[in-house]
Amino acid sequence: MENALPPADELVLVDRELAQLDTRRSQLLARRAWLLQVLAAPVARAAAQPAGPPAPSRPLADSTPRSAQNVLLTLGGALLTIAAVAFTLVSWGSMGIGGRAAVLVVVTSAALAAPVALLRRGLASTAEAVAALGMALMVLDAYALHRVALADTDGVGYAAVASAVLAGAWAAYGRGRLRGPLPVAVATAQLPLLLGVVAADGGPSALAWAALATAAADVAVALRATSAAVRITAGAGGLALGGWALLTGGWLSLTSPIPAGALLLAGAAVALYVAWRVAPLAEAAAVVAGLAVIAAAGGVLRAVAPEGWTVPGYVLCAVALAAVLRSAAPRAVRRGLAGAGAGVLALGVAWALPPVVAGLLSPAARSTEVWSGAHAEPVLASYPATAPLVLLVGTAALAAVPRLWARCGALFLAWALLTSLPVSPGLPYGATLTLQLLTTAAALLVAVRPDPATRGLRAPVRGPGTAGPSAGEPVDGASAAGAPGTAAGPSDSPDAAGSGGAGAGGGAESSRPGWGPRPVPTATAPAPPREVLAWSAFACGLASALSATAAALDTRAATFAALGLLTALFAVTGFLAEGGRRAVAACAAVVTATGLVGAGTAAAELPAHLAALALLVVPALTAAVGARLRRHPVALPVELTGAVAGLLAVGLAVSRPAVLALVLALAGVIAAATAVRPERRPAASWAAAALFLLATWVRLAVWDVTTPEAYTLPVTVPALAVGVLRRRRDPEASSWAAYGPGLAVTLVPSLFAAWTDPDWPRPLILGVASLAVTLLGARFRLQALLVLGGTVLALDGLHELAPYVVQAVGALPRWLPPALAGLLLLGVGATYEQRLRDARRLRERLGRMR
């Protein structure tokens, strides 16, 4: 047998295969033993049963004995409780004092003592039901005691005392084997302090303190209790009362910051203790604690700070919170505190954004004339001047976080800060425009050199992802080497995996495709941080540039200064930037240069048609730049942007056709000069031809030329020349593609003009020309020339014969035309097959032509 592998590699593969077979055999043996056990169980049960008639089958029960017992006990306890309530409310007054005392002592004592005996007999469920009845009787006894002996006491105060006594009694009663009294005691313990404060006519602050104290006790119980029911009850009570206390403290901090601050700090301490002790709730509890601390500190600052500093005070507290317990607190607690501070900071930033929007968009909402020297009224002049401070704090906070999203946020907030400065302090016009231009320059600088903003950030890992076999998936040769029970061969080492392993895999693939390596999917690498930051800064720079341009239209000098500076900034950015930012910046430089030229024409008070001639400087310069850059990626976008400026010049010259013809001709010259370059030749040559043709047509229209040949021949002659060149280069090219468009441009309009022309020279010239085209098509076997020339010649001849035909038809009797038509139909019908053969032969001949 001829082996495809070396003996050592083949031995490794054989060992792996044997190991897999041994593993599979062990699995099958275990499955066989289990199946034998399952099959043997019914036989054993049948052998154990005594012989006799089969027992009747019972219907399946739809409930378990335990569930039925619980339902019965619950129903019985509920009925006894209802009876006790009815007895207490209805029949209590008909008994004497001795009877009342006897009933009160006997029934309650019996209900509370019965569970002890029931537990000794193992009746736990019955004991729980009777204990619940006893606790309900204790509530009724407390009510009856108040009605008979303590009717003059305050009801709310008595309820507070009674709930405390009952909670303590039930807690002591439930320390045995009963499970129900302890959760009920915890639930009842939520009431004493709250009811006591209400009885003492305490205000919202005292009520919140009582709720917080109860919540703290709940937290202590929940952390120390061993029963799940007690922990859940205490945790729910602590959550409800603690949340209520903190919300009340936050509301009170708006009017009474000092007392409310103490309440909030106490609540924050409780929440922070929970975060430290309960790991699953650490992050959420830390968020609550952080918000409480911020509300407390911000409320105090709000009371002492002047007007307008409320939001900055809260934001400063939020940022300061991020530095608290950075080293001592657990990680989850730090995340929660940071999350609380981030949430408050986000709200503060949202509050500070209206001046940013006003500073960016208010110049575009112009209410004054361009170059009027008048400036728009300030927007949001009454907005607090501390809004930029919030943006500054947010910028500093995010810049300290070594994450890409944080750096992008810091970059945006820094730009927003500079954009909002002209709005909040109410800077004069010159300072505002200068600040906007400086903002644009700073943003473009970051877009060109984003490396300083990426310090401390790690670039994402590039390259394809790796994926191993999933659970239960058959492993390939490389993975099977590490399976239990397999001896490690030479190819198990990393070196062998790269050398010998590759050869083994290749040999296995040739014989067994299942052993071959699986294709690993490649993951798209994310953009590096410097690219993300650069594009973010570039977008901010573009926005500021648009706003500065709109603001600069107030005065003539500001317009020229702003457009000139922006043109220089974008040109430098296009020279220094990387990737797509270079092309966008270069195009922006062309746009601002176009605006600068337009501003110059407006300053010179040139009319629109003369301004169009001036605007042609832009496409000429962009064509020169493109010729200089050649195949540089920036060249094409720059030239296309210049072409758009050329279209704008054409639009301005429409009102003066003579100037429009000149503009089109000059644009054609620029396109023709561009067509000299090999990389632009096809598109630019077609554009130049179209522009020259349009210029010719406009000039002819200015000269009041109505002859269609004057408009069509300038198209036909170059088109036919191009067709001749194409046929020389490609003899197999169709005559329709080479000559059809050029001939149709002249022949068809001339034919329409000949049909409406009463004189004879045009039809005669058209007939001679179409005859010449037809003869050339027949001579050189060109289908396009033959069909177009023959069709036009026939229609032109029909036009010339039409008057005589009409005259002859008018002189003939009226019955003669129908008779001639009938004879024609008879003749065609008689020679139908011959006509079909002639038509087929003609079609074949035409088909053989090019």
Image (cartoon, grey):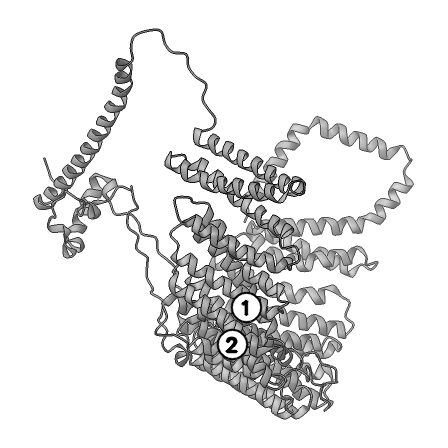
Quadrant containing the N terminus is: top left
Q: To which residue does mark 2 refer?
A: 412
Instruction: State the mark number for residue 605.
Output: none
Asked if residue 273 shows in the view, the reply is: yes
Q: Residue at x 46, y 64 (%)?
A: 285
Viewer-side residue, 408 vs 140: 140
Q: Position of residue 535 (x, y in %)?
A: 48, 73
Amino acid type, label 1: Trp
Instruction: State the mark number for residue 209.
Output: 1
Q: Position of residue 718 (x, y in %)?
A: 60, 66
Q: Position of residue 492 (x, y in %)?
A: 15, 51
Mark 2 surroundings: few (<14), some (14-19) or many (≥20) residues within 10 A: some
Dot 2 falls on a residue whose secondary structure is helix
Q: Quadrant of residue 259?
A: bottom right
Q: Residue at x 45, y 41 (%)?
A: 113
Q: Are marks 1 and 2 in contact (CB under 8 Å)?
A: no
